[in-house]
Image (spheres, rainbow, N blue to C red):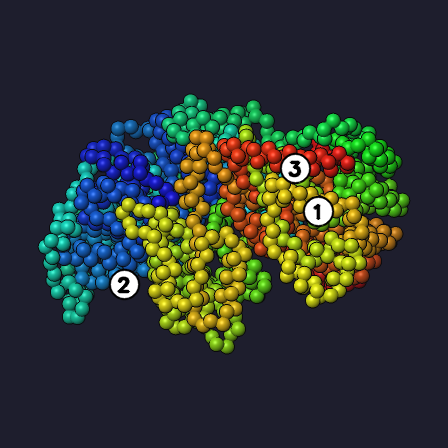
Amino acid sequence: MAERSFAKEVEKLRLGDGEEFAGEGILAITKALLQCGVGYVGGYQGAPISHLMDVLADAQDILGELGVHFEASASEATATAMLAASVHYPIRGAATFKSTVGTNVASDALANLASGGVTGGALLIVGEDYGEGSSIMQERSHAFAMKSQVWLLDPRPNLPSIVKAVEDGFELSEASNTPVMMEVRIRCCHVHGKFIAKDNRRPAMTVADALEQPRRDTGRIVLPPASFLHEKEKISKRWPAAVDFIKSRRINEFFGRDHGAVGIVLQGGMYNAVIRALQRLGLADAYGETDIPLYVLNAVYPLIDDEFLGFCEGKDAVLVVEEGQPNYIEQAFASMLHKAGRGTRLVGKEHLPMAGEYTGQVMLDGLSSFLRAEAPMLLSAEIRAPNKTTHGEEIPDISRVVPGRPPGFCIGCPERPIFAATKLVEQELGKHHIASDIGCHLFSIMPPFELGATTMGYGLGPASASAFNSPDAKRRSISFVGDGGFWHNGLTSSIGNAVFNKNDGVIVIVDNFYSAATGGQDILSSRAGNKTKSTKHPISKAVEGMGVKWLRHIDRTYDVGKMQDTLREALTTDEKGPKVIVASSECMLNKQRREKPLVDQAIKGGTRVVKPKFGVDEDICTGDHACMRLSGCPSLSVKSLDDPLRDDPVAHIDQNCVGCGNCGEVADAAILCPSFYRADVVHNPGRWDRFLEGVRSSLIGFLQRRRENRRLTFADA
Amino acid sequence: MLDAVLPSHSVEQSGDGGVIKLAILAVGGQGGGVLADWIVDVAERNGYLAQSTSVAGVAQRTGATIYYIEMCPELDSGAGRLPVFALSPSQGDVDILIAAELMEAGRAIMRGFVTPEKTTLIASSHRIAAVSEKIEPGDGRASSAKVRETAELASKRFIAFDMEKIAVENGSMISASLLGALAGSGALPFPRESYEQTIGAGGRGVKASLAAFGGGFDGARGNAPHAARPARSADAGGQGETHLTPSSATAVDSVVPESGSTPHVGGPRKLLAGWQELTDRVDELPPAVRDMALLGLRKVVDFQDARYGLEYLGRLDRAVAVDAPEQGYALSIAAAKHLANALCYDDMIRVADLKTRSTRGARVRREVGVKDDAIVQTTEYFHPRVEEFCGSLPAALGRYIENRPRLAAFIDRRINRGRRIRTDSFSGFAALWCIGGMRRWRRALLRHKVEQAHLDRWYDLALATMPQDYALAVEILNTRRLIKGYSDTHVRAQSKFDRVLSALPMLKGRPDAADWLRRLRDAALKDEKGDMLDGALKTVATLES
């Protein structure tokens, strides 16, 4: 079950011709796919595409009615390989994933797909995860489009535009026998907007039809000599076909005045930010009407030479707004101008930064710098030569006051005790080389744990420690991989590799029952039943099947002591070969989402329910915060005491505690202090509970009174 | 670069058509998405066009997140033209900024989203400490006051009160009280009813959300009790015992907060008479010292007995006798504070005693938030080692074992493991109750002897330093703050304490010796192992004498 349910929203996918659709960008993309008569869809989750996968998963009934096949692919490579169904058959297919991490994984399939070309429209929808909120290395998808020669669409970030881009993408793909990639940036995926819907279309040919009537064409298979022909065909046939399509269908848009001394060329995705900057410079109105000529590239690859040269006609200078580096588009345009012998000055990264996100301020600074340099008369006097305004008092710099707040483990996260145990083992045995992986468990690199030296890619944690395998070393490496990464490719790339190469390191597989970091999607080892997928395949069995001999399975990660003992054993045993620990407990975010409503309902309904929560005796806590250095739980925090005798704040557990047990276990395993207590609250106690409670409290009350009647007692005022 | 382009410059012509820009900064898990959806719904209910964006994903987990909304009235209805909204906030161009936590308001200011010309800043004044603030052994928390002062300067209007408290009190989430504050601020041209309709349309937890909304609304209008300090509910004293309030407590000095000024003391008459004698002695102290001395006295008597209080006052008198009134009795006040802390060391007896008191059950229920007839079962976590075992033996026997490592290791193997004790069960409670009862023999136990010796060395050192350097003596007393924690943590604390005081020979005679000692102490409170302290000690070693 995914973190977010779209069960209600997917009903919007049924909207028909002329009805208004209101919702999130990803939902609009799904609707567009159905309107285009897509025959099959696959993909792999990862922000900002996770919700697209979740929408599709929740929309399976609707997809089924239309005869559309949907797969939650094992990886991005799988999803892209799936598009092979469009090679021989006129079936439209779509694959979706996070870019550029997903595109990296997919690139083998992508290159093969692009070589042979497609018959049915093949669309790759990539979530361009660049800039704020991104959790990956910053690269561009653009390079993949260029190297494999697939066309790249970058629509303006509003719902009508992205819906149109999906429609255009399929047609462009079919017209040029080439897969098409459409990039949507992270905020565009989550933008809330409206568009006018069309009826959904059943695919003209379904995958079932294709299975019944198989086709083949050796000329489309990637093997010499066909592959040499593909390379030539890309240039002689597919490229001109794509250029014709983009031109004739006016995929790229022109705004602003027809003629002017300066102009701006921009990626479609940059449109809103450019307009906002122009508005702030007094050069555009609310609807984007502007005096500055704009050439908006909804297709950023291929570029259309004569369209661009036409735009430059009569202009002194043109600015290219292209986010990220290298500046492929700017280079290509510069080359076009040079070869055509034009005198128009082309500028781009002189005014805008070479690297990094083009935020509102960056865009404002860049456009203003361009216009001041090339067309100062367009700017009003106050912008061209502003009077320095002072706002009276200087606003103090508080950057040293405000603490950073990087993401971290959630309240009750089952991964926290794994790293608490690792930290404790390192206190005993010394520091080790630790390799991290992609997933929530990567938060281990942050305070308070600060464990992990590298992250090399999804499922590649143990693989990235494979060099550290030396008979001369007394210390072993430790590597982590999550269940998501494990099934994505870790089973072979990491575990298989370690077995085959007799790696002596320790591998911890963090199993939280979901692909949790991407939003809690089910995977092979998920323990929940899933109507449409086959789950409950234990990781330990797969690991054993790979040939791992030393395998321990911990089915409750909160047992810090056991976790610590197991890790110690793995690091010190004489046994050779990889030592694999599978540490399993359910992702608390998902568990709470599943259980909390049920528990609340049960309490309301009068059923006996025991709910645990932790607390701290503030008079026993000495305020050293050693517990927090082994936790970092948002629910465990500091609190000032109303006591002049005490200088430092003490530990405090707030009402959000879910009673996971980490605090108590850590206090015990690390021999911290006795100030933690666990309070199991028995809601709706039964008769026996009440009886026992009555007897106990009268006995306990007797002892308490006995002592308190013989001493001075101070009641807190 | 373009710092002078005034965002508010002539809205009529700058052409965004009066788009209202609203950003929400929250901590992941606070429900910022719900709030954004509500605001969009309210805007649309009022005939506005609105667009919201967010960044979902792993970056959201407990970290700082941002939601962004733009809205404007539908000016050109029917023409098919839609205004162009931006997808992310720009520096200097945000009309309303909602921060779901105070430091997030600070972050918004840092990022330039709050400007004096246009931004209404609505912030919940409560704090969610970041990990970096929590893991310092001292007090690593950021200064809320500094952020609030800056917010006043940086914004056009600053509305801040504890909206988290309002939410919790109404059994709701902060998104509801924040929406209330937004409505109450009047920063958006929408009537209160439309917000309430939006909440009502949500369908889940409507009643609680509306109550929290109302609290937030009133707060923003200035009708709510502004972030009142949580009042401690007074626990009822013992059953039918006499209560008296020491006279000195009425003379509250401004140096000390009111707490502890009106202690209700209960107990048998004989003991109360003894207590009266003790407080009479406090009354004889210089006025500046009395409040701290009374608090200290309570603490040590509570820890042990009245005689212990007498010992405390005796030690304190040594400082008072030599103290200088012109220094404001700083030495005696520090002595009154730290002597009490030193005398009340954290041994097993104290822990067991505190965990078995009658007031504790009620406190647990309050802390855990148990209402009605639910039963609470309490589990305590203990992990005794041979060190604690020896500490609670008669001094000679304890030392005998400690001096024989093999014997100690043998015992350690038998007792060193985690023990979970159910204090709601009779056997578990009784076991702790018995340990708490060892109080009466405490003075004979090894831990007591060790602690007393340590205390005397430290206190003598401070008093001996006083004649040459008064300020340094006070700082020696304040170094006591470093001693805290149990087991290994306590050992580490002791080591830091020793390391700080090891600098004394290098510092003595310097005019700034006290400052340096304070700096060393502050450094020792910065990290667990004392790396900062070691660095600071190296600096001290290089000082020219």
Numbered circle sitting on residue B435: 1
User: What residue is disc 3 on?
Assistant: A700
User: What residue is disc 2 on?
Assistant: A108
Q: Position of residue B474 (x, y in %)?
A: 80, 49
| Disc 3 element | helix
Q: How many marks?
A: 3
Where B402 sits versus A403, above or below?
below
Instruction: State if disc 1 and disc 2 touch (CB < 8 Å).
Output: no
Quadrant of the image occupied by residue A617? top right
Q: Position of residue A337 (x, y in %)?
A: 27, 58
From the image, state whether disc 3 or disc 2 is nearer to you: 3
Residue at image position (69%, 67%) is: B406
Mark 2: amino acid: Asp
Chain label for disc 1? B
Asked if both marks, 2 and 1, belong to the same chain, the answer given is: no
Q: Position of residue A178 (x, y in %)?
A: 19, 56
Mark 3: amino acid: Ile
